[in-house]
Structures are given as structure tokens and as C-alpha cells.
Image (cartoon, rainbow, N blue to C red):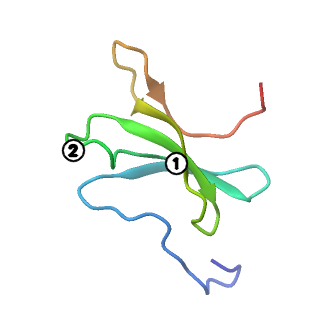
Amino acid sequence: MNVDGTGLKQLTYETFHHDAGEKFSPNGKKIVFASDQAYPDNCCFDLFKMNVDGTDVVRITSNLTVDGCPANGNCVWPDWGPRS
């Protein structure tokens, strides 16, 4: 979307699944988000990054739980941080 509110573009599409936790990268060029699209039972999320125009969607990791910690410890809430 442009600063004046024009040019709005939908980047993710919810069905009965969810895309959640979206965060802009520090330089504003990428978005990280979690999605459960690959899981019919909505059990888990995969972590993705994409360009701000919705192109170049890349799965970063899979089979995670968002905003909660199951016994296996696969917890995630998407955000950006320094490189290791």
C-alpha cells in the first residue's frame, strides 16, 4: 500500500487456514509470517518470508506451533532479529 492508502494489495489468503504473525524486516523489504496452509488439521505452522509485494515466498522452517509451547518445544512467533 502507498503512504496515502492507495494501491492496497492482498498478500495472503485465508480459507479455514490461517496466515499469522506477519512482521516487516528492519529494512522494510521483506515480510516474515507463519501459515498452517500445509496442515489439514490446523495442527502446526510453517514459517515463511516474502518480498513486500508478495513475490518470492520462501519457506524457512516447518512444523512449528505459534504463540504457545507444546511438549516438543517447537514454538514460534515470527519476528526479525540480528543474524547469528
List x then y, in percent, for residue 1. 62, 77
Q: With 19 as the anchor, is 53 left or right in this view?
A: right
Q: Is residue 37 above or below residue 69?
A: below
Q: Earlier in the sequence, mark 2 or mark 1?
A: 1
Q: Amino acid at mark 2?
A: Pro
Task: Give the quadrant of the C terminus.
Answer: top right
Q: Residues within 10 Å of mark 2 (few under 14, many from 20)?
A: few
Q: Which mark is residue 80?
A: none
Q: Quadrant of residue 15?
A: bottom left
**Which residue: 41% across, 52% down?**
19
Kindly report the distance in space between the C-alpha atoms of the residues bearing marks 2 and 1: 18 Å
Dot in front, 2 or 1: 2
Element type at mark 2: loop
Element type at mark 1: strand
Q: Amino acid at mark 1?
A: Phe
Q: Quadrant of residue 42?
A: top left
Q: Is residue 67 visible?
A: no
Q: With 55 as the anchor, is 13 left or right in this view?
A: left
**Which residue: 34% across, 52% down?**
18
List x then y, in percent, for residue 25. 71, 50
List x then y, in percent, for residue 76. 49, 30
Q: Is residue 2 above or below residue 70?
A: below
Q: Which residue occupies the extreme left position in the image?
A: 41
Give whichever of 27, 46 is nearer the camera: 46
Q: Is residue 15 visible?
A: yes
Residue of label 1: 33
Q: Is residue 54 above or below residue 58?
A: below
List x then y, in percent, for residue 47. 50, 40
**Which residue: 61% across, 87% down?**
6
Give whichever of 22, 50 is nearer the camera: 50
Q: Residues within 10 Å of mark 1 (few under 14, many from 20)?
A: many
Q: Which mark is residue 40?
A: 2
